[in-house]
Amino acid sequence: MSVTTSIDGSVAAQPAPLILTAGGSLRGTVRVPGDKSISHRALLFGAIAEGETVIEGLLPAEDPLSTAACLRAMGVEVSAIEAGRPVTVRGVGLDGLAEPDDVLDCGNSGTTMRLMLGLLAGRAGRHFVLTGDASLRRRPMRRVAGPLALMGAEIHGRDHGNLAPLAIEGQPLRGAEIRTPVASAQVKSALLLAALSAEGPTTVIEPAHSRDHSERMLRAFGADLSVHGPAGTEVRVRPGAVLRGQRVVVPGDISSAAFWLVAGAITPGADLTIENVGLNPSRTGILEVLLGMGAAIEVLRAREVAGEPVGDLRVRHSPLRAFAIGGDLIPRLVDEIPILAVAACCAEGVSRVNDAAELRVKETDRLAVMARQLGAMGARLEEHPDGLTITGPSPLAGTALASETDHRVAMSLAVASLVAASDSRLEGAEAAAVSYPGFWEDLARLRC
Ligand code: S3P
């Protein structure tokens, strides 16, 4: 720990930078924690169902803990969230959420805040205030609040309703046909949640298909929901169905597995098996890109668990070729672009990421942050308004690095540092706990 004194005289302890040792290889088996998107949804849908929901494999990380804390503040009983123990949610029914007596803190979690907006907008006569950490209070919420307003929602916030803290005056909502401005599962899911208790049916039409965990899980809970359009980009909800508590089994998060997939592919001599990874086709863009680069990845024991495809992934070191990605593929790997940038540094040729301006409004501006951090390591990389161009292979140097508070940046830089010429120091390594609390322990265990 180091101690810093801020200008107002207060003293805060900060973890010392983590030393990332370069070199060596990776071997063994790892089980990544539960899928973050599915974990949030299991808690939220369980809360508004009738009866009990039992969740196995829930991600015990900061983001789902934020969702659980918000639900508890509205009177929902959620059992303790601990690794390896099932979590029980006692549903209060669609309209059973109580008005909280304090602001709801969504922490660092965009999914918590956006899905809560949809869930709470229709709780007529109740008042809610949502806030979050400094990163979340900079992230755009108009993309949810705007379409919800078409259904009659009343949401106020800074920057004309765009930025948290956001106040929601619960209103009776009406169904609508809504074309969302971005392919975002958070926006889509917020609207689907609002639609459950609106007057009349709602159709949400996305510009491209985003992850469909909400559609799958809401149907499993009993919602009257149907999917249309050639790529499943149109989702219709008819209100009135009663949601019933379920047993939910959360698979491992492919977005967390992605760090091991790339680490295994770029580290000489590596051979890793990642068990129990969710392989929902709306999330497997990363696998397609890595396979296209020539990565030696095998899918083992492909199976279906509680409505989601699952498999084990084995990855071994192999030479990689550059990639070009853009268009409808981006929503299918949106969280994996930081780690793909690391893969690109180790691949032969010029890799291109296009149509990824969305990365600028994630936990950090991930295009700028990855360009800055990999640039500090000596990567040959250019930042564009909507993407990156990376020329590889780029020898990487060990240096002073910073996560800039972003969990996926922290883990991506850890992987890059494995193949650097010398050791690095990472500030803000603790950010990994937002989605992968055991990441540093798993890394230490797999090294050889
Ligand atoms: C998520 C959707 C994605 C993703 C985020 C989780 C979700 O965001 O980046 O980590 O659970 O719905 P967008 O929907 O805004 O692209």
Image (cartoon, rainbow, N blue to C red):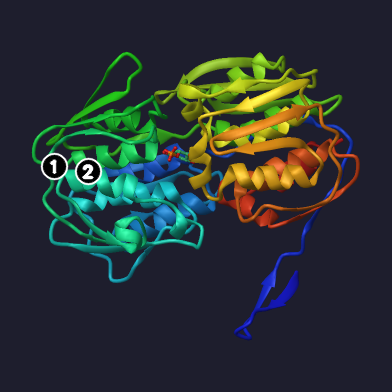
Q: From what the image shows, is residue 11 above or below residue 177?
A: below
Q: For this view, does 113 lie left or right of residue 420? A: left
Residue 163: quarter of image? bottom left
Q: Where is residue 39 in the image (x, y as percent from the top left)?
A: 44, 41
Q: Which amino acid does label 2 sit on?
A: Ala
Q: From what the image shows, is residue 213 above or below residue 14?
A: above
Q: How crowded is mark 2: few (under 14 residues within 10 Å), some or many (20 or more)?
A: many
Q: Give the Cα distance between marks 2 and 1.
A: 6 Å
Asked whether residue 335 is in view, the answer is yes
Residue 54: quarter of image? top left
Quadrant where the N terminus lies? bottom right
Look at the numbered disc 1 and give the secondary structure of its residue.
loop
Asked whether residue 93 is in view, the answer is no
Q: For this view, does 338 lie left or right of residue 329? A: right
| Residue sitting at x 55%, y 34% | 253
Residue where numbered disc 2 is placed: 194
| Ligand 1 in which quarter | top left
Q: What residue type is labelled 1?
A: Ala
Q: From what the image shows, is residue 254 above or below residue 54?
A: above
Q: Where is residue 153 in the image (x, y as percent from the top left)?
A: 18, 51
Residue 296: quarter of image? top right
Residue where numbered disc 1 is placed: 198
